[in-house]
């Protein structure tokens, strides 16, 4: 098996002034995850490390870069899964660093599949997780600066939630297969801009924003409610038993687009043979990937990838 990792930085409309910086951090996230695979680590370890890097970077709607709720708070969702069917998730966790690592602890330390809200945060604090404070949440600062600027293309986002979703509703995620042929996925998000407090999106929902079995692995990004309605990642993994990975992603994405329209999201996927597929129905989606034999990560924002 050839080790492969694929990372995304969210689907939607990315302000041009942020594109190059995001490309740089997607590339670093790919390197971070692939280095785990290259030294013989598991796919699960690789995707968690890649996503944790993106949470810490502050350049994505996850971890330090997360967008605010309608109350001005930050509430985080994350999940991890591997090919053995092990799954862990957290939802609506307030101001806690690296929720993807907390989801991994739910998987490893508890008999549960998901912990939510302040009790999930307390679980993390007991394990030594660090609380994030307001001055560390640079994503919130960037959002308020952007929507209040006179130069901002959308100066009235406060009154236009649908447009806000298209710009700042991104998520981060990673899928990988290791040298042993085991697959894994990880996903993390701050959710949709100005969401209601307590809202949990697709990222924490098994089959919607994340799905892994022994054949394929997929994670999604976009409008969580639409991805849940479409059970996007479950369909990809299900179809892979009968179709190629590329055809599986096309069928699942085309269904969601017919069902919920354009600008609803995107997906990345990998199968146990190292095939890669990515697709989105938004203006763009930041994607990077790396496998043995490549000179370095390939990163793009508008292309589909079928390898």
Image (tube, grey):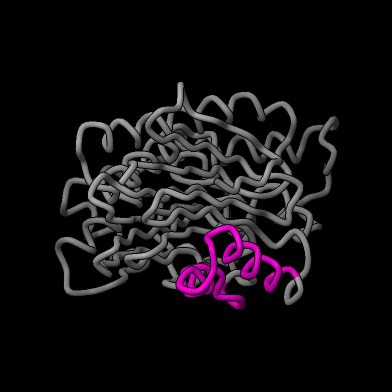
The structure residue drawn at horizontal position 37% and vertical position 48%, both measured from the top left corner, is 176
Q: Nearer the viewer, residue 173 or 248?
A: 248
- Considering every residue shown, the one lying at the far top of the view is 295
* Residue 200 visible in the displayed image: no
Compared to residue 106, the image places residue 154 above or below, namely above
Rendered position, 201 above or below 166? below
Which residue occupies the foreground of this view, 61 or 41?
A: 41
Residue 104 found in image quarter = bottom left
Where is residue 10? Give x, y as percent.
59, 47
> Chief secondary structure of the magenta span?
helix
Q: Is residue 98 visible?
A: yes
Q: Give the x, y percent position of residue 135.
A: 46, 34
Q: Residue at x 22, y 52 (%)?
A: 125
Point 20% across, 38% down: residue: 40
The x, y position of residue 88, in whole percent, is 29, 65
Number of numbered tags placed on the structure image: 0
Measured as percent of width and height from the top left, residue 7 is found at 48, 43
| Side (left or right) of 262 relative to 221 | right
Residue at image coords 54%, 40%: 60
Q: Is 194 covered by the magenta stretch?
A: no
Quarter of the image where one finds residue 150: top right
The magenta segment is: 228-257
Rendered view: 277 above or below 4: below
- Horizontally, residue 293 falls left or right of residue 277, namely left
Left or right of residue 250: residue 159: right
């Amino acid at each position: 098996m050839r080790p492969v990792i694929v990372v995304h930085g969210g689907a939607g409309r990315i302000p041009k002034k942020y594109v190059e910086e995001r490309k740089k951090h997607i590339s670093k996230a790919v390197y971070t995850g692939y280095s785990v695979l290259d030294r013989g680590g598991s796919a699960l370890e690789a995707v968690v490390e890649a996503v944790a890097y993106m949470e810490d970077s502050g350049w994505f709607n996850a971890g330090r870069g997360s967008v605010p709720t309608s109350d001005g708070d930050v509430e985080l969702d994350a999940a991890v899964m591997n090919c053995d069917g092990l799954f862990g998730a957290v939802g609506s966790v307030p101001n806690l660093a690296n929720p993807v690592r907390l989801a991994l602890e739910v998987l490893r330390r508890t008999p549960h599949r998901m912990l939510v809200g302040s009790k999930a945060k307390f679980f993390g604090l007991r394990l030594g997780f660090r609380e994030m404070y307001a001055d560390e949440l640079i994503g919130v600062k960037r959002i308020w600066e952007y929507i209040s600027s006179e130069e901002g293309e959308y100066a009235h986002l406060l009154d236009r939630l649908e447009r806000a979703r298209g710009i700042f509703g991104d998520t981060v995620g990673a899928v990988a297969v290791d040298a042993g042929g085991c697959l894994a996925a990880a996903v993390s998000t701050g959710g949709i801009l100005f969401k209601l407090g307590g809202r949990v999106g697709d990222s924490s929902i098994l089959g919607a924003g994340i799905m892994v079995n022994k054949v394929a692995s997929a994670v999604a990004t976009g409008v969580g409610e639409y991805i849940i309605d479409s059970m996007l990642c479950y369909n990809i993994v299900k179809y892979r038993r009968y179709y190629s990975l590329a055809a599986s992603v096309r069928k699942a994405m085309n269904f969601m687009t017919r069902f919920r329209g354009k600008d609803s999201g995107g997906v990345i996927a990998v199968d146990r043979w190292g095939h890669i597929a990515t697709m989105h129905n938004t203006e763009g989606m930041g994607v990077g990937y790396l496998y043995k034999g490549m000179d370095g990560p390939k990163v793009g924002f508008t292309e589909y990838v079928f390898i």
